[in-house]
Amino acid sequence: MCKHKNINFVFDLANNKIIIDSKLNSFFSLREILKYKSLLNNLAKRDFLVRYKQAFAGIMWALIKPLINILVFGYIASKINSSADTASNFVFVASAMLLWQLFANVFNDVSNSIIGNSNLFAKVYFPKIIIPLSSIVVCLVDFTISLFILVVLFIFSGQIIHWHIVLAPLFIILTLINGFGIGLYFATINVKYRDVKFIVPVILQFGMYVTPVIFPTDFYLQRMPQWLHGVYCLNPMVAAVDGFKYAVFGNPIAYNSYYFLISLAVAFLFLVIGVKYFYKFERNFVDYI
Amino acid sequence: MSKNTVIKVEGLSKQYLLNKSGAPKSDTLYGSFLNGLRNVKNIARKKETEEFWALKDVSFEINQGDRVGIIGRNGAGKSTLLKILSRITPPTYGRIEYSGRLASLLEVGTGFHGDLSGRENIYLNGSILGMSKHEIDRKFDEIVAFSEIEKFIDTPVKRYSSGMYVRLAFAVAAHLEPEILIVDEVLAVGDAAFQKKCMGKMEDVSQNHGRTILFVSHQMAAVQNLCNKGIYLKNGQLVEQGLIENVIPIYLKSGAQPDSKSFYHRSDRTGSGKVKFESFKLLNENYQEIDNAQSGSDFFIEITINATEEITNYVASIGIDDDFGTRITHLSNDTINQLPSVLSKGTSKVLFKIKRLPLSSGIYTFTLFSSSNNEILDWLQDAGKIDVESGDFYHTGKIAPEGQGKIYLDYSVSIL
């Protein structure tokens, strides 16, 4: 591997001139991503078309998988958490579960995206960030389809739509940011250490139990000492899930909003770290694959 | 950068670090478990590595409209150079400046997905190569027509024959319109007719549209046909650059690598083994070892043999096959009545002289056979390869067209 750290490309678009220099750094460039947006579209389209190809139930799997999870964990929640009635337990679990599944899919797909598409950037140049970005799109499509479950449950349980619902997209975006930031970090490690494919499922499994997916946050907070509350909220998905529940059901966040801000800050910190880390090694991926 | 220069390369170097003490691969579960433990334990320790310079201090400039052939042996750094120019891998040192849109074809059909239809793959592959949707829309019909697969455009490409697959893939690539096109030996695919079509397309692009092409190939005839400039790389260093007519002879002359080309390891032989083929060399007319023979030049195939006893009526023959495995010709000291009176014990050399090699460029395989008094001594199928570069067989300064047969005949034409 090259020990030289400062390498990359600069685009002098005014002169239509490209400089490749061993002394220049690579960086995030929105302009370059936009230049390759048709590639982004086509990769996303490919992933989507291929995902359910030759599967008998096809796109139905986008519904079946979360539905089973919701039924199982909704049942468990309604047995254990007596502070809410069965119907609302199910709806709470459904909303959190869908969001968590979005996070899990994004995290997993992004972390595998680079090695999964190494045949592309080993032969053609394009900004590699396009690959993880395109894998988000498919996850988002799956998520949109699975929202159907939530809508049905919502109507059945007799909930009313609150104006807060307009905030929901913000928390979906926050979830994407979480999955993307952490995923990007793991995607980078994955290039050299394929152990990632074993670690990610473990993190996700563990992560689901420390995120207010099955039980609400205060359920967790009531059962842990005061000093652990801050630690608990370091999980960036806490803010996303609680925020989403707030947006969908209008129930206010029952705990110190300071913790909410911690969780939010961690999310953005992860994004920055993930992107930085990715760009630090991006140029040398080919030499490692 | 002068006005005409489109690519300027300065002091380009690329270093790879090879893992010297990589843990030995283990076949057993227990062994790989131990390897895993060792790796985890060693993670902090710096691994022993060996430096390898794939490219070293390469500088050159390319003018607009130049068609540059990059030549050199395997491992000379040609592909690394193309990869750096294509921005696939970064240089360790050095700098490149270029202007205009650059597209690289290091492979045809990058990103093709078997489950997607021809149509979907055109869009996917096109966008990977850097075409916009609008651009692909505009050229779609042309691409389909070029590939000659109109009927199957909505069939998943995994159902395509390999020929159709390659045609479609190349058709997309051929419709790229970059100012600079980088082509690796992708043309070595498909049938001869299609190859010709591709070469024609590339020539058209460069000559009629003033585009710059960088082309890597082992086929000197193809390079000579297409390119006007040449860059000769050897062991990562630039040996020669300039007009292609001047660079190719320098490349062909250098050769003589201490490549063993021995048969010791071959166990798939037939015969009594009283005389065994040990190794072979290709020599030019001055008895210097060469890697490639050249059409129209004299050359020798020198075969080292080892006899365990004295042999009478020793017959040695070479059967030469083309790349499709068709026997082209057969050389034997028996046919031309040149049997040795007796072959002495120990090592000897059998020298086949071939005058004005009448084979066209390509890679030929040969089989070695020896016998004595109807006893097979040693028989080695596909013993080695002869790489024939195109050359001036007719001493006219012209080269017979590529893809027009395997042999040259000594002929004349009279018009009465």
Image (cartoon, coloured by chain):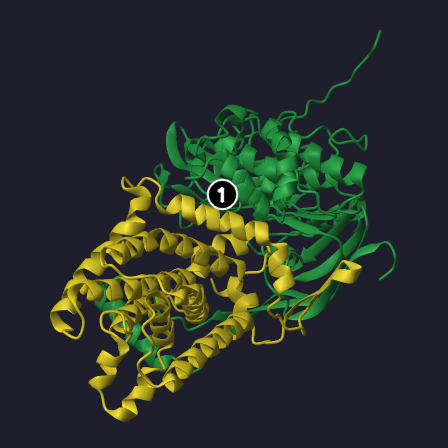
Chain colours: A yellow, B green
- Pointer 1 chain: B
Assign the N terminus of chain B to one quadrant of the image: bottom right
Quadrant position of residue B394:
top right
Position of residue A32 relative to residue B393, above or below, is: below
**Which residue is depicted at the point 60% across and 38% down?**
B172
The residue at the far bottom in this view is A227
Please, what is the three-letter code of the amino acid marked with disc 1?
A: Phe
Whether residue B44 is visible here, answered yes or no, is: no
Camera-side residue of B258 and A27: A27
**Which residue is depicted at the point 73% across and 58% down?**
B239
Position of residue A68 relative to residue A49, above or below, is: below
- Image spot of residue B88 (x, y percent): 59, 59
Quadrant position of residue A252:
bottom left
The residue at the far left in this view is A79
* Category of crowding for the residue at label 1, using alpha-carbon neighbours closer than 10 angstroms: few (below 14), some (14–19), many (at least 20): many
- Which residue was labeled with disc 1? B112
Camera-side residue of A156 and A101: A156
**Which residue is depicted at the point 60% across and 35% down?**
B171
Tag count: 1
- Is residue B319 left or right of B141 when viewed as pictured? left
SS type, badge 1: loop
Position of residue A75 relative to residue B161, above or below, is: below
- Is residue B171 left or right of A115 when viewed as pictured? right
- Image spot of residue A12 (x, y percent): 74, 64
- Image spot of residue B23 (x, y percent): 36, 71
- Is residue B11 left or right of A42 when viewed as pictured? right
Assign the C terminus of chain B to one quadrant of the image: top right
The residue at the far top in this view is B416
- Image spot of residue B216 (x, y percent): 66, 47
Whether residue A137 is visible here, answered yes or no, is: yes
